[in-house]
Amino acid sequence: MNRRRTSLIAIAIAISAVTLAACSSTTSSSGAASSAGASSSGISCVDGAIQASGSSAQANAITDWVNAYQTACPGATIDYQPVGSGAGVQAFISKQVSFAGTDSAVKGDDLAKASAVCANGGAGINVPLVGGAIAVAYNVEGLDNLVLDSDTVAGIFASSITKWNDPAIVATNPNATLPDATIAQFHRSDSSGTTDNFTSYLTATAPSTWTFGSGKDWTATGGQGSKGSDQVIASVNQTPNSIGYVELSYVLDAAGAKAASIDNGSGAVEATSENAAKTIAAAQVTGTGDDLTVQIDYTTKEPGAYPVVLVTYEFTCQSGLPSDKNPALVQAFLNYGASDAGQANLVATGYVPITGDLLAKVRASIASIQTS
């Protein structure tokens, strides 16, 4: 574990310890947490079990939340499987899970199918809980700092730039020693919200170079596919002269991979939680009511704003979630994720907390989930 991640964890643990000490855990048969509990301790214990699946980008954050919740509430079991956003949404549609994690909001036909799971005319809602930077991870011996602009990133992943010493890469790294080596490019092979956000960034910022559109499924030619964020970072770690894209938390623990800085048009910006937060803070809520779909401006030129970001949603029924899916535990667990303590823990794992008016709306959305 690198020193930067260790320091972040120490800070977040200290914050969480102080916050959690302020209130003791409570046991609730209904799972309805008070607004004070949701914003202070964040822990309202509900017994039982739930299964959830989806985004691998948020897996490190969810794992930390699950460990904290189950430690405080030994009668609860929460099983989250990081199978990818597309598979998670399909698992919800197939009534296999209590909530799905997805890096792109559930909408269109999938929203109609997912809402059909909700009984008595209930509707599904997208609840944004985790923000993050999508790191362009690379592994080139001796190259400790790499700067790329959007056209160059698009060219690499469109396979029109295939050598590390291509003039486009040299232009943004004039003082670097770049090898005359073929770029080994890795992308997600499974249906992925990280891919959706990454290709949305490329579509918005480099449309003349990236002509493959955006979506959860990789459609560009060339490169090599790896399933899940963990396999993408493993591929980059193990392969010299390689590049890929993963949520930043995976790079913080990487043995060989580093994160490139991205020139957003106002200069090179390092991939950090703090820099990603500047872009996420400007996101606009486009959903209606308690469905909190947000729109990200990938074309931001704000100095110091890292532009390649994602917001991960938890999707569930606002009302009508089948009783065997334990809606009370779903609400209680999501309440913890949205609490001060839960959001503070995101910093330790390299994510971006939800803040301000959006966080207030998130808490209200979770509170609207009917538990019986």
Image: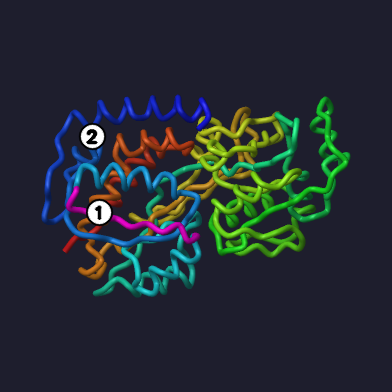
Please report the residue visible at 42 percent of the width from the left and 33 percent of the height from the top: 348
Of the numbered discs in the image, which one, if any, rests on residue 69?
none
- Of labels 1 and 2, earlier in sequence is 2
Q: Position of residue 60 (x, y in %)?
A: 44, 45
Around disc 2, counting alpha carbons within 10 Å, would you say few (fewer than 14), some (14 to 19), or many (20 or more)? many
Q: Residue 49, how many percent across, how many down?
A: 24, 60
Closer-to-camera residue (112/309): 309
Does residue 329 lie above or below 264 as drawn?
below
**What separation in Å lies between label 1 and label 2 (alpha carbons)?**
16 Å
Q: What residue is shown with label 1?
A: 331
Q: Are marks 1 and 2 in contact (CB under 8 Å)?
A: no
Residue at x-position 45% and y-position 57%? 82
Mark 2 residue type: Ser
- The answer to whether 152 appears left or right of 308 in the picture is right
SS state under label 2 = loop
Q: Which residue is mark 2?
A: 40
Range of residues picked out in magenta: 74-84
SS type, badge 1: helix
Q: Find out whether residue 243 is within the magenta segment.
A: no
Q: Quadrant of residue 225?
A: bottom right
**Mark 1: amino acid:** Gln
The image position of residue 3, as x and y in percent, is 51, 25
Residue 75 vertical placement versus 152 (above, below):
below
Q: Nearer the viewer, residue 215 or 157?
A: 157
- Coloured how? rainbow
Q: Residue at x 16, y 44 (%)?
A: 34
Say which residue appears at 76% left-offset and 43% top-offset.
241
Q: Is residue 187 left or right of residue 140?
A: left
Residue 245 image offset from top left, x and y in percent: 63, 48
Give the quadrant of the C terminus. Answer: bottom left
Using a 10 Å C-alpha cutoff, classify the residue at mark 1 as few (fewer than 14 neighbours), some (14 to 19) or many (20 or more).
many
